[in-house]
Amino acid sequence: MKVFLVGMGVITSQINLYLTNAGHSIVSQSGMLSETTIQEGKFDGIVVIGPVAEVGPNDMVKAAEAGKQMFLVSDGTDPIYAWAASARVKIFPYPPSPADLENLDKEIKSTETQPPDSAEQYRNRVLGSQASAQLTDIGSIRRKIVITSPKGGTGKTTVAVNAALLLAFCGVKTFLVDADANVGSMIYHLRIANQDTNATLTSLLKTRAARLESGSSQPDPHGLQNIALAGEFLRSFTPYQDIPALNFLPGVAVKDLDSKVLENDLAADVVMKGLFDAGTSANGVVLMDVGINPSNTVHRAALRNAEAIAVVIKAEIPDIAHTRHWIGLMIDALAKLPGWSEKQAREHILSRINICYNMVSSAGWERPHNVLQEALGADLKASHLVLTVNGFLPIVPPNIADTAVNSATARDLYVWRFKQLRDEELAGFVGSLVGFVSNFMPIRVPAAQMGFIKSSGQEKPQKRGIFSRK
């Protein structure tokens, strides 16, 4: 492991020598830990020699946010000892005996060979154990989420990517999938276009289609194949380097648009279900950013396996008109599947839809929404459902929006930028996004801890609109 050693004096030098001889790479040794070092340093872990290091709990939290592994050598009197104990950081005695040094070496090597759950570490060290327990107690929360739109230009991918960032920063293990079969732009938003990845959506579809064609998928009465398949899908995600709780799966490349595998219904269903199940079995949330065509094989498979369907539209009459007919297309797409009736398809879609109005101007969203509600009146009545607004996101200043898309760094994405700079021009968007994402996950407390919204004592509670039965 590449280690940054924080401490001064003879004992620190002895630890440096021992770890170097044990095969670790000590990239630097310093008496203090700065934010610049954390962000720019090329190291995986931090060993802090507490009594002789200028390090406070805030420094360690910054390191945890960056996904650094950490180990503390302490006599119990240094400023970070209590924090480290509560955050479940491995602590070794100071001054260390030969046996203690051996245990430190073994622990570092163990972390390399069997990496701990990065999201759990993030929650414990950044948010605290109470928030961690709250976020992992999510049995009834909707964790299989499709984010879609009836037309381009509504900001669907912007919402998907920023929602994923928000969830991950709040300590939720998040799996973001580019499931747009017409080529999505997620990799450009995240600035990962040139990054090596474990798999892509296309590669998973091709593998599954080949197995189905060869007949290698056999009946699985004991569920062993399903267990193996869940592990395979989980390993297909690539961890996002700068955010410990975020994982991603790139989608379809332009060169793959004519691939017949994109028309394989069975392969698409197995892959979409497998990705959803893999992420949720790891106690996470899966966000699938799909395209605008529900008759597409991949899109349809995502819809039929979703627990929630987030529809991102503009609060404008032309978008509302598109939305009315497009919801009908979603229902028709599922109704054509074997074993599905029109009634089942209607209830499946309408009961899962969460409307999010994006780029809302001062004119508001009420009038366009009333038009949509009236247009869907017959379908809603037939399914005994009521249409309400689940979220609305205010328009972002053009210069900030342009930077978020075109700059060289993902740190200019709205949620990340706000986290770093507390840019007041983004406060409305980020606060409203917290409200919308709270329809799926209980993130208000960790969001307040992270500074995305004010604590409950400082703000009025917002209503959570959902599709609900009368």
Image (cartoon, grey):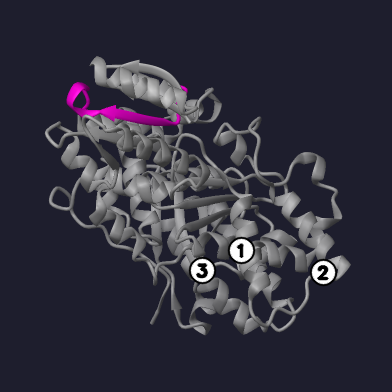
**Mark nearer the N terminus (1 vs 3):** 1
Element on which disc 2 rests? loop
Q: Closer to the observer: label 2 or label 3?
A: 2
Please identify the quarter of the rendering in which residue 217 is found.
Answer: bottom right
Would residue 370 appear left or right of 422 to someone viewing this image? right
Q: Quadrant of residue 359?
A: top left
Q: Amino acid at mark 1?
A: Ala
Q: Which mark is residue 392?
A: none
Q: Residues within 10 Å of mark 1 (few under 14, many from 20)?
A: many
Tell me which segment is drawn in magenta. 42-55
Determine whether 72 is above or below 134 in the image.
above
Camera-side residue of 31 and 191:
31
Q: Amino acid at mark 3?
A: Glu
Q: Residue furthest front?
A: 98
- Relative to 9, does residue 250 appear above or below in the rendering? below
**Residue assigned mark 1:** 230
Is there any visible trace of residue 419 in the rendered image? Answer: no
Quarter of the image with the C terminus in it: bottom left
Residue bearing mark 3: 307
Identify the residue under disc 2. Answer: 216
> Are dots 2 and 1 in contact, CB under 8 Å?
no
Question: In the rendered view, does 329 fall on the left or right side of 143?
Answer: right
